[in-house]
Amino acid sequence: MAEEQVPEGLTADYVNSEVREAMVALQATPDYAHLTAFLNSLRDGLLVVDVTGTAKKKATHIRTIRSTQGKLVLPLFTSMAELRAAMPKGKGSQAKGAMMPALEALRMIRTQPFVAAQFDVGSAALVVVRKYIDLALDGEEITAERLEAGA
C-alpha cells in the first residue's frame, strides 16, 4: 500500500479492538445479545486476511482452511499479531497479511463456497457460520430478537 493511501493513525500493530472485545465477550457469555454485539462490531474497522506464500504468484490469493468435514472456512484476524499466532511454531515471522476494511474482508466469504469464517484462529478460534456473516454484510439492523427468531 502506498504511503499516501495508508489511513491516518494506522500502524503495523493495529488491532481491531472492538471486534476482539466483542468476540471475547461472546465466548465468555454465548447468548444472542453478545452475538448481536459481535456481528455489529464486524461492520467497522479493519480485518486481516492471510496472504502468506502468495508473493511469487501472479495474483494474491487468500489462504483458507478446511473444516473437519473438508468444507472451506475463511480465516480472518483482528490484527497481524493474531495472524502470526496462527502460524506453525517458528513461522510467525514469515506471516504476510493484508489489512482491509472489515466489510470488504467479510465479502470474501461470497467468493468461494465457504461455510463459515473463523476469527483469530491462533487464540480465540471463533467459528461463525456463513448465515451470520451474511447478516453482518446485508446492512440491516441486527438485534438479539432477530437472531433468536432464526434470522
Image (cartoon, helix red, strand yellow):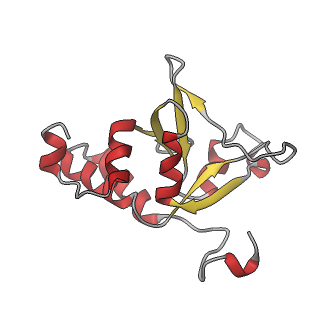
For the view shown, which residue lies furthest in the top direction? 69
Does 129 sit left or right of 108 as displayed?
left
Residue at figure coordinates x 71%, y 43% from the top left = 61
Whether residue 24 is visible: no
Q: Quadrant of residue 54?
A: top right
Vertical comparison of 1 with 98: above or below: below
Residue at figure coordinates x 63%, y 47% from the top left = 85
Whether residue 77 is visible: yes
Q: Quadrant of residue 2?
A: bottom right
Q: Quadrant of the N terminus?
A: bottom right
x, y percentage for residue 67? 51, 24
x, y percentage for residue 40? 31, 58
Residue at figure coordinates x 66%, y 76% from the top left = 6
Vertical comparison of 62 with 70: above or below: below
x, y percentage for residue 130? 39, 37
Does 23 sit left or right of 148 as displayed?
right
Query: 97 and 120: which one is in front?
Result: 97
Numbered marks: total: 0
x, y percentage for residue 128? 39, 39
Residue at figure coordinates x 65%, y 74% from the top left = 11
Query: 59 and 64: which one is in front?
Result: 59
Does 117 sit left or right of 55 as displayed?
left
Query: 54 and 110: which one is in front?
Result: 110
Q: Quadrant of the C terminus?
A: top left
Does 148 sit left or right of 120 as displayed?
left
Vertical comparison of 26 with 47: above or below: above
